[in-house]
Amino acid sequence: QVQLVESGGGLVQAGGSLRLSCAASRSIFSFNAMGWYRQAPGKQRELVATITNGNTANYADSVKGRFTISRDHAKNTVYLQMNSLRPEDTAVYSCNAQGAWRNYWGQGTQVTVSS
């Protein structure tokens, strides 16, 4: 069973930065891609950013130029660097790993941006 453990969430003022981490229980090479999604209260879950094994990154329009997704294969960890945070970025952020047969999800980490 694959485990994804997120960390790095918290409370930050608008304009600030946070770095989220997602540590996988097995080699991230075994996944086709990994990514971050978020869900704000009363809203549907939305894609934030994904990164493939070939290091191709994809971002939601709302975070382009502010967020950066990256991978550290030695640590089996994916990161989401979030800069210039806005109150509308407030959400639970969840890590996702696309396996050959199914997707895996972490438990989520809360990010709250105050105005």
Image (cartoon, grey):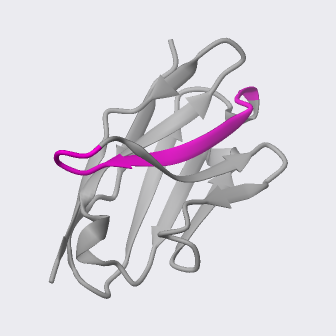
Q: Is residue 32 left or right of residue 81?
A: right
Which residue appears at 15% of the width and 83% of the height? Answer: 115
Q: From the viewer's perspective, is residue 17 above or below residue 81?
A: below
Q: From the viewer's perspective, is residue 56 above or below residue 35?
A: below
Residue in front for this viewpoint, 33 or 40: 40
The image position of residue 51, as x and y in percent, is: 68, 50
Which residue appears at 49% of the width and 70% of the height? Answer: 63
- Queried whether the magenta region covers residue 87, the answer comes back as no
The image position of residue 73, as x and y in percent, is: 71, 46
The image position of residue 78, as x and y in percent, is: 57, 50
Which segment is the magenta one? 30-43
The image position of residue 33, as x and y in percent, is: 69, 38
Q: Is residue 113 left or right of residue 64?
A: left
Q: Is residue 53 left or right of residue 16?
A: right
Which residue appears at 56% of the width and 22% of the height? Answer: 103
Q: From the viewer's perspective, is residue 7 above or below residue 84?
A: above
Which residue appears at 44% of the width and 29% of the height? Answer: 105
- Queried whether the magenta region covers residue 31, the answer comes back as yes
Which quadrant of the structure image shows residue 87? bottom left
Residue in front for this viewpoint, 115 or 104: 115
